[in-house]
Amino acid sequence: MERDWELCRMFHQVARCRNFSRAATLLFTSQPAVSRAMSTLERELGCRLFIRNRRGVELTPEGRLFHAHVEAAYEQLRRGREAVAQAVGLQSGSIAVGATETAVRGWLFPRLNRFHAMYPGVRLRLHGGTSREAMEELKSGAIDFAVAAVSGGEFPPLRETRLCSFRDVFVAGRGFSHLKGRAVPLAELAREPLICHRRGSLTFEFLEEAFKEHGLEFDPAMEPETSELVLDLARHGLGVGFLPYGAAEAALTEGALFEVRTRETLPERRISLLEYEGHSLSVAARRLRDMIEEDAEVGVEDSAADHAEDVGQGDGVPA
């Protein structure tokens, strides 16, 4: 293959120069070496490629046909080099990121905005869904990396970089005022119509495990797809919603909902960047990953601890 490329490279230069000596100068070789190479190429192709004249050489019909293909190959090579140069310079390319709703709201938005402002030529493709779905897409190679809300231990063969922690809250509207202003046992809460992200999500599994640890069955009344739907259903008085505090903060501040404090303390969860071991990333994907990891260990809610203390001392946000 290397020999074929060298012969084509020489042929391309001779076809452009129409002169063996001039082509040899541009190729940094001798005129006899070029002549021998063209004789070898003609012998291998089984036809004449050049006809000599007083000014040098002209292409035969077969030579013109062959040159059209060689010229096209050179053009593809040129475009390939330009594409790689642009990708290395972060002027083009695309990045596929798996991102859960909690991760987008709690961590990704400002970093995606900053990356897009710096490298507008790089196309960002976000794959939504649950954390579990993001992990499966990562293993299949459909995405470069994932940023997701997770809990528990490790997820081999995925490599995890922990970005920040966050807490979840139960929220309710006026129709559930009997739950307001006190620490409600999970056993009592289990008898209320609960609203949680759909079965199969890590949020569902997290809450189901928390109930199991206290000998309780977790059987939510509703399993919407998004935190926004959890909030809407809770606002309409259809149950007690469970979702990340960051997604509920505005509704709590406005007084549309109040936080239902529990007697049992639920563990915090975390937003993490997940990568597949051995999966190589493009220059653009590595740059975005580094930007996402820059502020790792900074919490989603800067005042989460203070907020928890305030809620513990008072009645929470009024309904």
Image (cartoon, helix red, strand yellow):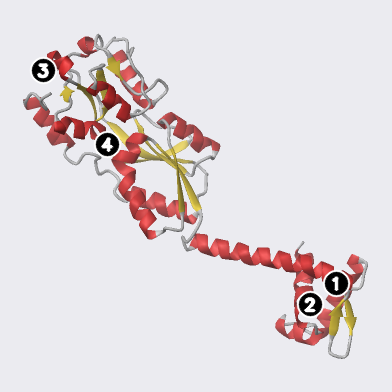
What is the distance, in whole Å, between disc 3 and disc 2 at their CAs? 88 Å
Q: Earlier in the sequence, mark 4 or mark 2?
A: 2
Would you say 180 lies left or right of 47 here? Answer: left
Is residue 262 positioned above or below 164 on the image? above
Relative height, residue 122 to residue 188 (above, below)? below
Foreground residue among 143 and 297: 143
The residue that label 2 is drawn on is 15
Crowd band around label 1 with a 10 angstrom C-alpha radius: few (<14), some (14–19), many (20+): some
Mark 3, residue position: 182
Badge 4 is on which residue?
165
Sequence-wise, the earlier of marks 2 and 1 is: 2
Q: Nearest to the eye among marks 1 and 4: give it.
A: 1
Label 3 or label 1, whichever comes before in sequence order: 1
Sequence-earlier tag: 1 or 4:
1
Per the rendering, the mark at residue 304 is: none
Residue under the image location 25 percent in, 8 percent down: 191
Asked if the residue at tag 4 contacts the one at tag 1, i.e. Cβ–Cβ closer than 8 Å, the answer is no
- Give the residue type at disc 1: Gly
Q: Residue at x 89, y 66 (%)?
A: 44
Q: Earlier in the sequence, mark 3 or mark 2?
A: 2
Residue 37 in percent (x, y) is at: 84, 75
Tell whether label 1 touches label 2 (CB within 8 Å).
Answer: yes
Look at label 4 and name its amino acid: Ser
Q: Position of residue 274 (x, y in %)?
A: 42, 39
- Identify which amino acid the numbered label 3 is placed on: Arg
- The residues bearing labels 4 and 2 have C-alpha atoms spaced at a distance of 65 Å
Separation (CA) of disc 3 from disc 1: 90 Å
Element under label 3? loop
**Real-space Cα separation, disc 4 to disc 3, in angstroms:** 25 Å
The x, y position of residue 85, in whole percent, is 53, 64
Q: Is residue 153 visible?
A: yes
